[in-house]
Image (tube, rainbow, N blue to C red):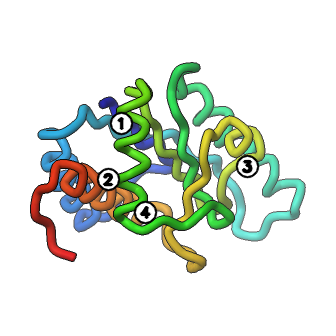
Amino acid sequence: MNISIISVGKLKEKYLKQGIAEYTKRLSAYAKTELIEVPDEKAPEQLSDTEMEHVKQKEGERILAKLHPDTYVIALAIEGSMKSSEELADTMDRLATYGKSKVAFVIGGSLGLSDAVLKRADEKLSFSKMTFPHQLMRLILLEQVYRAFRINRGEPYHK
């Protein structure tokens, strides 16, 4: 399986880079994993609704440019469905079984994802009703995808 994680913005924090590198390495035993960063749109702190939509649209265009037509897209969105680790493992197993060998998880910027990206998504996934920094979500997502592969292979992993 080929897994892409497409996210907005450059990762700066050393501790997050280390965690992401560790889980990317662990995942390499199960899938080809590609981390793709698209630039965030520069914007002032205070934005009008129109300006916010413009920022999301620009970031969305960059995300959509990285998606292949045959890729199954899972957008991380607060309004998405919540799953247990086992349910995510079932989803990954189902995708592999039915020939969806390219899966992309999409993480938006600080303002979220554009409507165009959400429409392109085959599925919307929420990790919580809480808001997390989008950089931290990369690490959390990688850990959960790694856990899903471990679950599907019947390999031990702490609960």
In the picture of the structure, the residue carrying the numbered disc 1 is 3
Q: Say whether disc 3 or disc 2 marks the residue closer to the N-terminus.
A: 3
Distance from Cα at disc 3 to Cα at disc 2: 29 Å
| Distance Cα–Cα, label 3 vs label 4 | 20 Å
Name which residue type carries label 1: Ile
Q: Quick one: quadrant of the C terminus?
A: bottom left
* Residue at position x 28%, y 60% in the image: 143
Rendered residue at 46%/38% (across/down): 104
Name the residue type under label 3.
Val
Of 100 and 65, the residue lying toward us: 100
Relative image position of residue 86 (x, y in whole percent): 35, 62
Q: Position of residue 110 (x, y in %)?
A: 60, 62
Q: Which residue is mark 3?
A: 55
- Quadrant for the N terminus in the image: top left
Counting residues from the N terminus, which is met first, the one under dot 1 or under dot 4? 1
Residues at marks 3 and 1 touching, judged by CB atoms closer than 8 Å: no
Q: Are marks 2 and 4 in contact (CB under 8 Å)?
A: no
Q: Are marks 3 and 2 in contact (CB under 8 Å)?
A: no
Instruction: Identify the element where label 4 is drawn.
Output: helix
Of the residues tagged 3 and 1, which is closer to the observer? Answer: 1
Q: Label 2: which residue? A: 145
Q: Which quadrant would residue 138 be assigned to in this image?
A: bottom left
User: Foreground residue, 136 or 27?
Assistant: 27
Q: Are marks 1 and 2 in contact (CB under 8 Å)?
A: yes
Circle 4 residue: 137
CA distance for labels 3 and 1: 26 Å
Of marks 1 and 4, the one in the foreground: 1
Q: Position of residue 13 (x, y in %)?
A: 31, 64
Per the image, label 2 sits on a secondary structure element best described as helix
Name the element at disc 1. strand
